[in-house]
Amino acid sequence: MIGIIDYGMGNLGSVTNALDHLGLEAEIVDSPSRLSVYDHFILPGVGSFGIAMRSLDASGWSDALRNKVADGIPFLGICLGMQLIFDIGEEYGTTAGLGLIPGRVVPLNPSPSFRVPHVGWNGLSYPGRHPIFQGVKEHIDFYFVHSYQCVPALDENVLARCDYGGEFVAAVGKANVVGVQFHPEKSQDMGLKILENFAEWDGTC
């Protein structure tokens, strides 16, 4: 069963509806004490990196999620949830993240003719394939809403890139952790395919 982490900043409804549409067992989890019954986790999120990390830290989620990742449980971060898996976020000051993938989260800086936040549909390219992208064609459009971008310390953690007035990292992975900057739950059939692939993934590559 998939646990959808509720820390007060996630678009839980759309993620839950997408998983329900796929016929996947999923529940919203509002306490770290309940994590033992789930074999996959999704960390959604919208809003500010700093506020989100303060919420995760204060509620005990940060250490609980790190422990579950250390146990090998498959973990997916979506949008802000992807950003939170990095070491450092630079939104409104510097804040320590979950530290599951090395790197930083910095302002999106496209060429001047491109607006920030980046809102809309854009295609992906895949420097390295991963089980969550099984059956997903290159250059298929996915839905983005973000003002910050992830900069992994290691290229080996980059799963996909997007070009929006300059290239940025759109998906990352390390061991049993993956993150996507776009919203698969709002990205039609191929977005649902990614969620389905995640549910079937055993956390190995």
Image: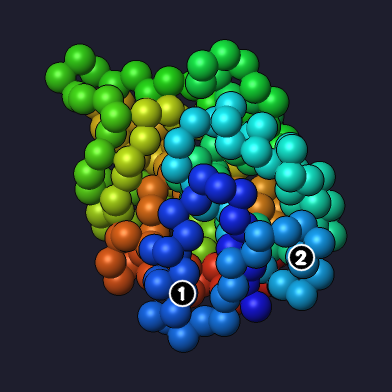
- Quadrant into which the C terminus falls: bottom right
User: How far is the residue under mark 2 from the one under mark 1?
Assistant: 18 Å
Label drawn at residue 19: 1
Give residue 42's quadrant in the image. bottom right
Residue at figure coordinates x 61%, y 49% from the top left: 7
Of all residues shown, which one is farthest toward the bottom?
23
Q: Position of residue 153 (x, y in %)?
A: 63, 27
Q: Position of residue 175 (x, y in %)?
A: 71, 53
Label drawn at residue 35: 2
The nearer-to-camera label among 2 and 1 is 2
Q: Position of residue 92 (x, y in %)?
A: 51, 16
Left or right: where does residue 184 sit relative to residue 177? left
Nearer the observer, 188 or 175: 188
Helix, strand or loop for disc 1: helix
Left or right: where does residue 140 sit relative to residue 203? left
Give residue 63's quadrant in the image. top right
Nearer the observer, 27 or 127: 27
Residue at figure coordinates x 51%, y 21% from the top left: 91
Q: Neighbour class for label 1 at 10 Å: few (<14), some, many (≥20)?
A: some
- Quadrant into which the N terminus falls: bottom right
Asked if residue 191 is positioned above or below residue 182 in the image, the reply reads: below
Task: Tell me whether circle 2 and circle 1 mark residues in contact (CB < 8 Å).
Answer: no
Residue at figure coordinates x 24%, y 18% from the top left: 111
Residue at figure coordinates x 45%, y 30% from the top left: 149
**Residue 100: in sight, yes or no?**
no
Asked if residue 202 is positioned above or below residue 169 in the image, the reply reads: below
Helix, strand or loop for disc 2: helix
Identified by mark 2, the residue type is: Leu
Of callouts 2 and 1, the N-terminal one: 1
**Residue 54: in sight, yes or no?**
yes
